[in-house]
Amino acid sequence: MPDTTMRMGRSWVHHGPLNNRVYLLKLDPHDMPGLARMLLLLARREGRGKVIAKVPDGHKQAFLDQGYLIEASVPRMMAGEDGHFMSFFIDPARSKGPSEKEMQTIRKVTSSKKKPKKAHEVVELCAKDAREMARLMEEVFPSYPFPMSNPDYILHCMSNDVSYYGIKKKGKLVAMGAAEMDRSNGCVEMTDLATRQTHRGMGMSSSLLLHMEEEMRARGYKIGYTIARSASMGINMVFARDGYDYCGTLSYNTNISGNMESMNVWSKVF
């Protein structure tokens, strides 16, 4: 069953059994300082293993006072203010942090000197592409933290500040990515990168990312970030080669590709 997005006061929260967490997507200052505690109450009532919150620097102390830890920090992420991914581990098994193998991946990708190229034509996707996008996401990811295999969910996102881009070969969608815009904070999350098995190793994710950056820069966004699977050398390499900086690891954070996985946060000033 997919997790759900709900209002908590004026803030937005995503929670449920799939990711076994409570995730504060959007903090409204009117809900502070009590929001940090309310998230914990929700998580305990629903039996969730982790709470994670995106928090502006000016409100981090309220979360620290409740026992949250900073797992990752993105400079200038929230209207010019540093943004933090702050977590409370109800289940201690969720708090192990990056393994040595995962740290080796980070060290290897950050040392890469190879620069990405825009080697493929990228087009902006629209409503008529939603079904094909959903099929691609379902094919690539056995599980995903958001219901991207549902065309209706994709259409909902399109109408709520998410722009999708794709690469088509012989009229068929073979790769896609999304730019999720946060207008109030002036940042954008680069997400939902997916490439069919038959077209991997061709630089399609890099082409998509470069194109999305151009589009977002033209719209006035200056900060981009991503939350990438720590177990995937390839996707971390895509962002590292494009000049993104490693900002931290979210421990056992996301149900993706059939497993609960840790996620690396990367960011870049455009």
Image (cartoon, rainbow, N blue to C red):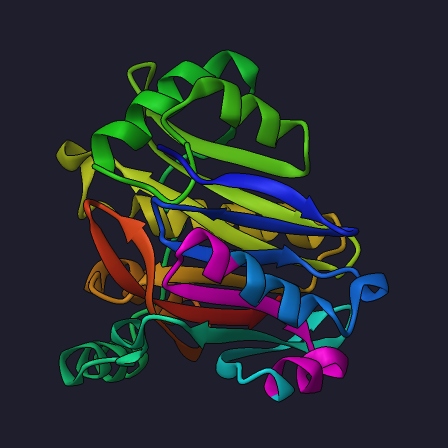
Look at the picture and state if 233 lies above or below 113. Answer: above
The magenta span reads: 43-64
Look at the picture and state if 178 lies above or below 41. Answer: above
Residue drawn at x 45%, y 52% is 46
Residue 26 in picture, x, y percent from top left:
67, 56
Count of marks, rendered view: 0
**Image quadrant occupied by the N terminus:** top left
**Image quadrant occupied by the C terminus:** bottom right
Q: Nearer the viewer, residue 112 or 9?
A: 9
- Asked whether the viewer can see residue 125, the reply is no
Look at the picture and state if 57 lies above or below 23. Answer: below
Residue drawn at x 29%, y 58% is 235
Q: Is residue 242 left or right of residue 238?
A: right
Residue 118 in picture, x, y percent from top left:
40, 49
Residue 45 lies in the magenta-colored region: yes
Q: Is residue 39 left or right of residue 143?
A: right
Residue 269 in picture, x, y percent from top left:
61, 71
Q: Residue 124 falls in which quadrant of the image?
A: top right
Q: Is residue 259 left or right of residue 169?
A: left
- Asked whether the viewer can see residue 144, the reply is yes
Toward the front, the furthest residue is: 45
Q: Nearer the viewer, residue 47 or 135?
A: 47
Residue 127 lies in the magenta-colored region: no
Residue 59 in picture, x, y percent from top left:
74, 79
Q: Residue 220 falls in which quadrant of the image?
A: bottom right
Toward the right, the furthest residue is: 30
Q: Nearer the viewer, residue 208 or 16?
A: 16
Residue drawn at x 56%, y 22% is 155
Residue drawn at x 39%, y 71% is 90
